[in-house]
Image (spheres, coloured by chain):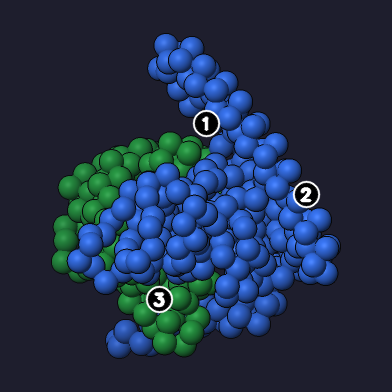
Chain colours: A green, B blue
Amino acid sequence: MKLLIYFLAIFFLLVIQQGVLAPLRILPVNLLLLFAVTAMVVADFNTALWISLACGVVLDLASGTADGLIILTLFSTFLMVYFMLHAWVNREPNQLVLFSSVASATVLYYLLFLLFARIFGIFHLAPAIDFNYFFTTELPLSLAFNLIFTYPVFLYFSYVQSLWSGKPEQV
Amino acid sequence: MRFIYTKTFTKIFTIFVLIALFIILDAKGYIGLAKDGFFRLYGLAASKVTGGTNGIKSVFNTLFTIKNLVSENASLHQKVAELSYNNARLKSAQDENSDLRKALNLKQQSRLNLLPVEVLFLDATGFSQTIVIDKGENHAVKLNQPVVASPGLLIGKVTKVYPASAEVTLITDPGMVVNAEAVDSGAHGLIRGEHGLGLTFDLVTQNDLIKSGDQVITSGLSGDFPRGLLIGEIAAIRSSATDLFQKAFVSPAADLRDLRFLSVVQ
C-alpha cells in the first residue's frame, strides 16, 4: 500500500511537471529527481531505493531518449549520492543537507547521463549528444530550477509520507 | 562482512540486472503494449492539466495585451486580405501548372496522403525534442514518415513506432537534418535543430542570395521529406561574407511548443 501511494505520488508529480511547468516554459526542471533525493535524505534505504527506481522508470517512459538511459542514470545517481551522504555527511537531515544533496545530485545526474549516453552511443542505442550545450545551458538552468523547487517537493514528500504514516518529516 | 555478501549488494545487483533486461526487452519490442498503455494514461492526465494551465495563461495574456488588440486586429485584417489575394494567384498558377504538365505529358504532382493524429504529450525532461502521437503500427504508421501540421508545416518525423502510438522527433532536435531551399532565391542548404530554440539554415553557398523574411521549404532532395513542406522563415543571417558558407537563423512556421492535432504523411 505504501509503495502504491508513492508510485501514484510520483506519477502525479510527473503530470504536474508536464502539465503545469512545461506550458509555463519552466524547463529544464526535474521534480522526480528532487523527490528521489528527498527520499534519500529523509527516508530509509529500502524506501529510497524503491522510490528512485520508480522515478527512473516513469521518467524513462515519458522521455524521448533511448530506453533505459534515464533509469540507469537516476538509479546510479541515487546510489552515489546516498552512499556519499551517509558515509561522509552528518546523518541528521537538515535543510543544508537537503539543498546540497539536490545540488550534487543534479550535477551528478547530468554527468552520469552524458557518460551513459556516450556508452549507449557506442552500441548504437542512442544518438550523439551535444556535450557543450548540456554543460553550458541545460545544467546551470536545471540546477537553478531544481534548487527553487526543492522545498516545495520536500513539503509534498512529507505530505505523501503522512498519508500512510500519520506524521510528517521535519527538516 | 564483505559488502558483496550483504543483502544491500544483492538488491542493487538485482536491480541493475532488471534494468539491463528492460533495455533488451525494449530493443526487441516486447514491451510496446505496456508503453502504449502508459502513454495513453499519462497523455490523458497531462493534457487535462495542460488545458487548465493554458486557459489560465491565456486569461493573463489577454489582460496584459488587451490594449494592443485593436491595432493587432487591424494589421491582421490587412494580412488576411494580402494572403487571400496571394492564395488566389497561387491557385491560378497551380491550375496553369497542372494544365502545362498534362500538355507536356509530365507526371502530375501527387497530393499527400495524410493520416490525422493527436499529440499525447511532449518530452518534459528537455533531453530530447520529441512528442508521442496516438497512432502506431496498427494504423500503418512507419519509421521515418514525415509529420506535418495543417496545412503543410513540417513538424518532424517518426522515429519509434509501437502498436498503438509512435514517437516523433521534432525538427528543432539537434539530431534532425532536413534538406531545404529558400523559396525566393532557390538557395539550397541544410536545416538543423537548435535544441528546441529554433533552426539553423546552414551550408548555403556564398553565391546564393538569402535574406530575412525568406520562406524556407523542404527541397525533397534526400527523399526523407516530400518537396514543398513549409519549414519556417529566415529571421536573421548569422554569417559574414568571409565565411565559407552562409548560415541563417530560421523561425519554425509551426508553434512546436503547442502541438495538438497533426498529420502523418504516408
Q: Which residue is the site of mark 1? A: B53
| Quadrant in the picture for residue B91 | top right
Query: Label 3: chain?
Result: A
Query: Label 2: chain?
Result: B
> Element type at marker 2?
helix
The amino acid type found where label 2 is placed reads Asp
User: In the shown orientation, is residue B155 left or right of residue B233?
Assistant: right
> Element type at marker 3?
loop
Residue A154 percent coordinates (x, y): 35, 43
- Inspect this view and state whether residue B63 appears: no
Check the image and report above or below for B26 versus B265: below
The alpha-carbon separation of the residues under discs 1 and 2 comes to 45 Å
Residue B95 — which label?
2
> Element type at marker 1?
helix
Name the quadrant of the C terminus of chain B.
bottom right
Residue B201 percent coordinates (x, y): 40, 60
